[in-house]
Amino acid sequence: MIEKKEILEELNNRSREVFRRVVEGYLTDGEPVGSRTLSREFSEDISAATIRNVMQDLDFLGLLGSPHKSAGRIPTQLGLRMFVDGILEVSEVDKNDRKKIDKIVSDETNQVEDILDDISTTLSGVTQGASLVLTPKREAPIKHVEFLPLSTSQALVVLVFADGHVENRLFKPPPGQTPSSMKEAANFLNAIMEGNTLSEAKKLIKNEIDFRRQELDTLARDLVESGLALWEDTEERHERLIVKGRANLLNESSQQEDLDRIKNLFDDLERKRDIADFLELTEKGEGVRIFIGSENKLFSLTGSSLVVSPYMNSDRKIIGAVGVIGPTRLNYGRIVPVVDYTAQLVGKMIADRNKR
């Protein structure tokens, strides 16, 4: 049996050209492409019957399909994957698109969070799809932590980062906590957290709790462990998933079934159930990745494609991602370089700001 990667290699020049034209026609118009249409496009004298025979061969290989018995052909999911992997020609980023993205990222008066919000809006407008931006966890070193009791059932944790950012979080402390036990816990945390990021501090704290468990007051230890649980709670993650351009997807479909699937997609996104999975999609190396149809396990919308790229900090560590989601007939040649360019620019912007 022919492996997927070998399918295109097995095609002769004519079959490959017919396949390319069918896919490009479908991506442009969203309509099946017929043999008569193709026969008029070929510069050489090739009959519609000959092209029909080629299309049947491509059907047999699973690259093309026909939505109706008498209709032309459209690419299958496998066909789109083969086209993207082996034939797609990626263009340069349009000058106007580049200017729009550059303008957002170069605005030094805005905070990173605001820039990423604007990037999401800009990506949606530029691509006419729905944009996705996964913002990074705050990885600046922690300068100081403090617990402030507000009542017997509520307390405030104040995190002061080395870059000047301050986060205040309400949480429910373990029963029996007193101001003195909270102060003791804060002193313990400050002794080992200063100069470390939250992710680094969590590992250190766990090690310290095991090593110094007998030295900690029982109530203070409970507070520390409660704080760890709070920071690791999936509902309290530091990442945010920004989604813009919902209307762009809704406008692509008039079928109720498609609309229902799109609504399910955004229900998934808005609940942020799969933020970690979204980031995981990008962790197999640098550069843009394309997920077509059911390959895209993150979303319930099987008739969609996701073009996503990670962005990295100065240590080449993946800290977030940007992407575009839309129908499978996305203009991949235009959107891939836009996503790639945006991801690189965002990563550079964050790395530059962290040096200050």
Image (cartoon, rainbow, N blue to C red):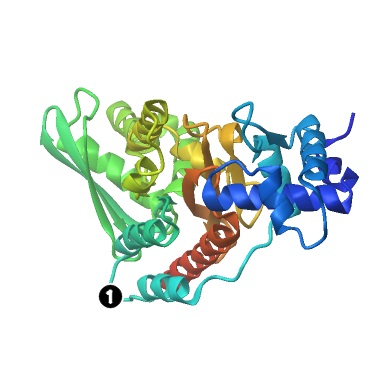
Identify the residue at horizontal 28%, vertical 28% (top origin): 219
Is 6 situated left or right of 35 in this image?
A: right
Q: Amino acid at mark 1?
A: Thr
Q: Position of residue 260 (x, y in %)?
A: 37, 27
Q: Which residue is mark 1?
A: 109
Q: Quadrant of residue 270?
A: top left
Along the line of sight, which residue is nearer the eye, 233 or 84? 84
Considering every residue shown, the one lying at the far left of the view is 151
Identify the residue at horizontal 34%, vertical 66% (top origin): 163
Along the line of sight, which residue is nearer the eye, 84 or 273? 84
What count of labels does the image hold?
A: 1
Instruction: For the C terminus, give its image quadrant.
Output: bottom left
Secondary structure at numbered mark 1: loop
Considering every residue shown, the one lying at the far top of the view is 175
Residue 229 can be seen, yes or no = no
Q: Position of residue 111 (x, y in %)?
A: 30, 66
